[in-house]
């Protein structure tokens, strides 16, 4: 109500804004709960959740929240991913207990675990990763850490491609099992699923090598990738490399000899001195393959042409 001189007027109750979403293009889809989570206002988050704020379907899809070089942050779209990026454990518990889906994906196919691999505060991101993974139902058929995004990348693969050494090493240590320990020496076994290129078309090894980020190459120095690469080189790589080197040398030598012994003959026309034989011209096709040496050169020329075609297709 509002009091005016001599009168009392009752105003209609304002429309609840708990479910309202932003309509402006940069912030479309943002709700009051998103804002409260980013500001880490635990009291307001608890109040909104008690009044039925949506934690499953609400998605901030505006251009301000999309991933790109023009944006300074990428918190995903769901309320849980916003909470994960802020790193507030109490808010994360509240959101998950209110029904937030840990395996929910945004328009890029990223879950909250994917988005944590892209955050600048890597230490806190690792702690939140463990927290969210611990809140997931233990009987889930497909864990959130195993879900690929639209690019086919799981969280550990995304960390490798982005060159996030801290997150990648943290996730690798979660795959490690200590066999035995003797003083300062520990023998460990690593689960190489998603890591080794054997039997996996989109492995971490291939993704790191093909990544456009130079930071990703530093991941090759981490265990067990360093030992895995050394093992592959000693068992297969060096023999394959030596064989290709030998074939390449044979090809280059053959090509060079064909050029050196190409079919030439002294020029007979427009010669002032008959003893001058320093000027040569190409022999005709009928003359080019008349002798035994020409037949050997023909074999070399065929090898040169076929090698060039094979090299072209391989490249």
Image: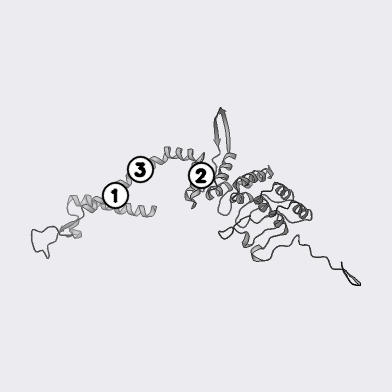
- What residue sits 57% from the left and 31% below the top? 179
Q: Position of residue 253 (x, y in %)?
A: 27, 48
Q: Tag 2's secondary structure? A: helix
Residue on which the image places disc 3: 243
Q: Secondary structure at mark 3?
A: helix
Does the CB distance between marks 2 and 1 fall below 8 Å?
A: no
Whole-number angstrom distance, CA of label 1 to CA of label 3: 14 Å
For label 2, the crowd category at 10 Å Cα-Cα, with few meaning under 14, some 14 to 19 and many 20 or more, is: many
Q: Is residue 287 something that shows in the picture? A: yes
Residue 187, numbered circle = none
The spot of residue 214 in percent (x, y) is 48, 50
Closest to the observer, 281 or 42: 42
Q: Earlier in the sequence, mark 2 or mark 1?
A: 2
Q: Residue at x 72, y 59 (%)?
A: 32
- Specify few, some or many for label 3: CA neighbours under 10 Å numbering under 14, 14-19, or 20 or more: few
Q: In terms of secondary structure, where does tag 1 sit?
A: helix
Residue reaching furthest to the left: 274
Q: Which residue is mark 2?
A: 219
Q: Is residue 283 left or right of residue 75?
A: left
Residue at horizontal 30%, vertical 54%? 305
Mark closer to the chain start, 1 or 3: 3
For the residue pair 241 and 79, the one nearer the viewer reads as 79
Q: Determine the CA span between mark 2 and mark 3.
A: 28 Å
Residue under pointer 1: 252
Relative height, residue 12 to residue 36 (above, below): below
Q: CA distance from mark 2 to mark 1?
A: 36 Å
């Amino acid at each position: 109500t509002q009091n005016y001189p001599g009168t009392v007027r009752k105003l209609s109750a304002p429309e609840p804004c708990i479910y309202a979403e932003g309509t402006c293009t940069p912030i479309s889809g943002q709700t009051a709960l998103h804002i409260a989570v980013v500001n880490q206002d635990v009291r307001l988050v608890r109040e909104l959740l008690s009044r039925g704020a949506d934690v499953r379907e609400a998605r901030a899809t505006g251009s301000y929240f999309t991933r790109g070089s023009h944006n300074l942050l990428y918190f995903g779209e769901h309320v849980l991913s916003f909470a994960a990026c802020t790193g507030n454990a109490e808010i994360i518990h509240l959101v998950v207990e209110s029904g937030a889906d840990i395996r929910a994906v945004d328009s890029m196919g990223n879950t909250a675990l994917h988005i944590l691999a892209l955050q600048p505060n890597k230490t806190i991101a690792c702690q939140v990763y463990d927290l969210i993974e611990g809140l997931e139902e233990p009987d889930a058929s497909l864990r959130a850490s195993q879900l690929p995004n639209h690019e086919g990348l799981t969280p550990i693969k995304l960390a490798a491609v982005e060159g996030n050494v801290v997150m990648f090493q943290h996730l690798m240590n979660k795959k490690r099992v200590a066999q035995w320990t003797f003083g300062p020496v520990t023998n460990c076994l690593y689960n190489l699923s998603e890591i080794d290129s054997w039997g996996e078309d989109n492995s971490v090894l291939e993704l790191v090598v093909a990544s456009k980020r130079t930071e990703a190459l530093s991941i090759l120095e981490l265990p067990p990738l360093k030992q895995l690469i050394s093992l592959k080189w000693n068992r297969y790589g060096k023999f394959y490399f030596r064989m290709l080197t030998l074939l390449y040398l044979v090809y280059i030598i053959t090509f060079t000899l064909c050029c050196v012994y190409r079919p030439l003959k002294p020029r007979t026309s427009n010669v002032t001195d008959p003893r001058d034989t320093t000027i040569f011209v190409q022999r005709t096709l009928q003359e080019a393959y008349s002798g035994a040496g020409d037949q050997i050169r023909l074999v070399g020329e065929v090898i040169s042409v076929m090698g060039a075609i094979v090299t072209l297709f391989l490249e």
